[in-house]
Image (tube, rainbow, N blue to C red):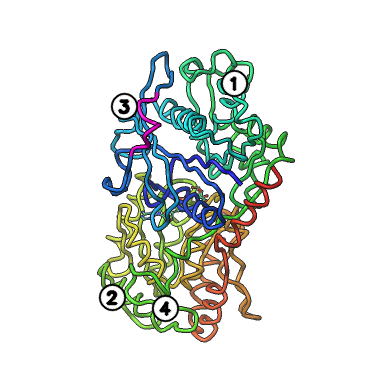
Amino acid sequence: MKICMICSELSPIAKTGGLGDAVAGLARFLADQGVDLRIFMPFYSAARVDRQAVMPVEFLQGLRTELAGRAVEYDVYTTALPGTSQPIHLIHCPKLYARRGIYDDRGDEHLRFALLARGAIESCQRMGFGPDVFHLNDWHTALVPIYLRSLYGWDKLFAGSRTLLTIHNLAFQGVFPAREVAALGLGPVRSLLHQDDLARGRVSFMTSGILHADHLSTVSPTYAREILTPDHGFGLDPLLRARADHLAGIVNGVDYGEWDPASDRLIARPYSASELGGKEVNKKALLEEVGLPYETGVPVLGVVSRLTAQKGFDLLFGTIPELLSRRKARIVILGNGEARFEEFFLRLQSVFPGRAHFHRGFDNPLAHRIQAGSDMFLMPSRYEPCGLTQLYSLRYGTAPIVRRTGGLADTVELYDSATGSGTGFVFDHFEPDALRWALDYALDSYTDQTRWLGLMRNAMAQDFSWERQGRHYLDLYRRL
Ligand code: ADP
Ligand code: GLC
């Protein structure tokens, strides 16, 4: 099987959230299965790669493609997917990718990601590689199908190729002014673009992908259903409904090579379901690291997240301060993002010294230690396509407290204190009272330590490995 995977993030090389983890995990799985896999991503200046281990691909140097009426020069480099011999192709174009971060606000994101699409397709041409499936991820790669139908439509190499667009987050659509259509090289095929978009003076990468990809998928069955509704469709639900027969929902896998407390080298003490003593050691170490006092029997809530509206932290405004005054608990938060959330967590920490700690920033080792050192993991998302952090917390025996939406609904099962079944605490309505109920239920359950150990074991026994989840992608590729 020949697969061409195109992405804007792949961890640990470039990651701002779960997209990088998901793509890297699937790529590893496919490489293990012996799939002939070609991966393309931009060679950002911000890429975390060992520059010594990056080699130019000899026959892919000094390439040119036309964007915005000018020839843009690029080269292709290669490096191995960390820990494997699977090559990754890096599109090198300092003019577009030498920026401070992965994404940028200089107003040329459309050109940066059009080059990714074109560079990947043109490299396949030069490699004589006609993929069975082009697997695209999010809006950044969503012009590939229309390009294959237009600019590269003449090339018989791709006659048998199918395209699969995986939507990791529908909120990000890649929308630009309609005058950029020509810059993208789509002037001659304006009629293939979504006419309503053009009428409104814009062009959208995501819309084009939804219209032209042979198949669509998203990262959980529940989110696949939700995006067909006006509530979660971000304006694209009518288009998605029209393509509902070609839309699959596949829950992401977890790279347990990186996220498993039994082998995690970033945490204070390894532990597993049969050796749970290490959990408390990690809890003490975490509290010490962040300067909160440890007390036996006092639970720790953890948060690791982008601080955006998606993640639902506005529900904490009316619940967490009250909870910390009313009950014994600690909370450790790692994240950055919107000012209103950062300010709230800063205030929380100053109003509740010794009980709340906020680390503003992006810190992967600390993320691991919060997973290992917390008793509960808080994720009250407004919407959540899949969510990986709750999958990590399940494996770390850290009971997720989540809202029943998207992938959270598909992966966390409400704990039943009567029967001892379930893996976490799930509330339905996006309202403070609902979250308050879940928090109280979790804290009450925690007081019965024997039962709590049972809950931890239920959570740790869940298997969201790529060995399982990746098979669904293989099946889908085969069907295509
Ligand atoms: P999303 O992709 O919507 O951000 P996911 O749950 O799918 O949510 O994935 C988030 C990923 O990003 C996880 O690997 C999580 O550990 C990581 N992450 C998020 N915020 C931070 C942070 N501030 N520091 C370190 N890692 C973070
Ligand atoms: C997006 C979603 C998240 C998902 C991740 C990987 O960032 O917000 O829910 O887990 O992509 O698919």
Q: Pointer 3 and pointer 4: residues touching (CB < 8 Å)?
A: no
Reading the image, the residue beneath label 3 is 95
Q: What is the distance, in whole Å, between disc 4 and disc 2 at their CAs?
A: 22 Å
Q: Are marks 3 and 1 in contact (CB under 8 Å)?
A: no
Q: Position of residue 128 (x, y in %)?
A: 53, 33
Q: Nearer the viewer, mark 1 or mark 4?
A: 1
The three-letter amino acid code for the residue at tag 1 is Ser
Task: Classify 10 Å Cα crowding around label 4: few (below 14), some (14-19), many (20 and above).
Answer: many
* Residue 10 visible within the image: yes
Q: Nearer the viewer, residue 304 or 271?
A: 271
Q: CA distance from mark 3 to mark 1?
A: 26 Å
Q: Is residue 59 magenta?
A: yes
Q: Are marks 1 and 4 in contact (CB under 8 Å)?
A: no
- Identify the residue under disc 1: 150
Q: Residue at x 41, y 65 (%)?
A: 302
Q: CA distance from mark 1 to mark 4?
A: 54 Å
Dot 3: element: helix
Residue under label 2, please give it: 293
Q: Are marks 4 and 2 in contact (CB under 8 Å)?
A: no
Disc marking residue 271: 4
First to last magenta residue range: 56-63
Which-is-in-front pick, marks 2 and 1? Answer: 1
Q: Residue 4 location in percent, x, y? A: 54, 41
Q: CA distance from mark 2 to mark 1?
A: 63 Å
Nearer the viewer's eye, disc 3 or disc 4? 3
